[in-house]
Image (cartoon, grey):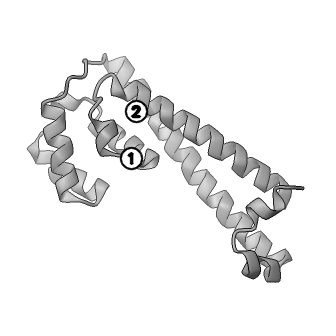
Amino acid sequence: MVIQAIFLLDTLDKDINSFAMRVREWYSWHFPELVKIVNDNYLYCKIAKFIEDKSKLAEDKIEALTDLVGDEDKAKEIVEAAKASMGQDLSPVDLINVHQFAQRVMDLSDYRRRLSDYLTAKMNDIAPNLQSLVGDSRRLCSGF
């Protein structure tokens, strides 16, 4: 099971990265400035889901956005960028699709995190000395 989990983690890493890039590409048609403000893929998906239509992002949402990004200055920067954005309007159907795809990326990322925790626990059970010696032994075992 360990080797299968390792292969699945590797596949998930590639897929999540690819899908997150697609969300960034797709949402950038609407709000291109956000890519430069938010580097983390998971956080980008959360913010894209929260904002949806950038034209409806106003000062009254700064507090909720601050909770999401963990930084009030960054939240204000996002709101200001949305006001001056050069992106085009997306249809409601397109925004729904971006929203749903961003949620799928987040779900896959959450599953990947749980699988990684499972693998760590499994390695602690079957090879605790190896686990304590090399830490995350996923890469060490991936040669099998």
Q: Residue 66: x, y in percent?
A: 22, 56
Of the 4 image quadrants, the one containing the C terminus is: bottom right
Q: Which residue is mark 1?
A: 39
In percent of the image, x 39 and y 47: which residue is there? 39
Q: Count residues near mark 2 (Cα–Cα under 10 Å), then give few for <14, some for 14-19, many for 20+.
A: many
Q: Is residue 42 above or below residue 100?
A: below
Q: Residue furthest left?
A: 59
Q: Residue 53: x, y in percent?
A: 25, 29
For badge 2, the amino acid type reads His
Q: Classify residue 18 by image quadrant.
A: top right
Q: Which residue is mark 2?
A: 99
Q: Is residue 68 above or below residue 122?
A: above
In percent of the image, x 78 and y 49: which residue is there? 7
Q: Classify residue 56 by image quadrant.
A: top left
Residue 1 appears in the rendering: no
Q: Is residue 98 left or right of residue 70?
A: right
Q: Is residue 26 above or below residue 16?
A: above
Of the 4 image quadrants, the one containing the N terminus is: bottom right
In percent of the image, x 45 and y 48: which residue is there? 42
For badge 1, the amino acid type reads Asn
Q: Residue 51: x, y in percent?
A: 27, 38
For the residues carrying marks 1 and 2, which lies nearer the camera in this image?
1
First in residue order: circle 1 vs circle 2: 1
Q: Residue 103: x, y in percent?
A: 47, 40
Residue 7 appears in the rendering: yes
Helix, strand, or loop for circle 1? loop
Q: Is residue 46 above or below residue 33?
A: below
In percent of the image, x 28 and y 60: which residue is there? 70
Helix, strand, or loop for circle 2? helix
Q: CA distance from mark 1 to mark 2?
A: 18 Å
Q: Count residues near mark 1 (Cα–Cα under 10 Å), then give few for <14, some for 14-19, many for 20+.
A: few
Q: Classify residue 119 by image quadrant.
A: bottom right
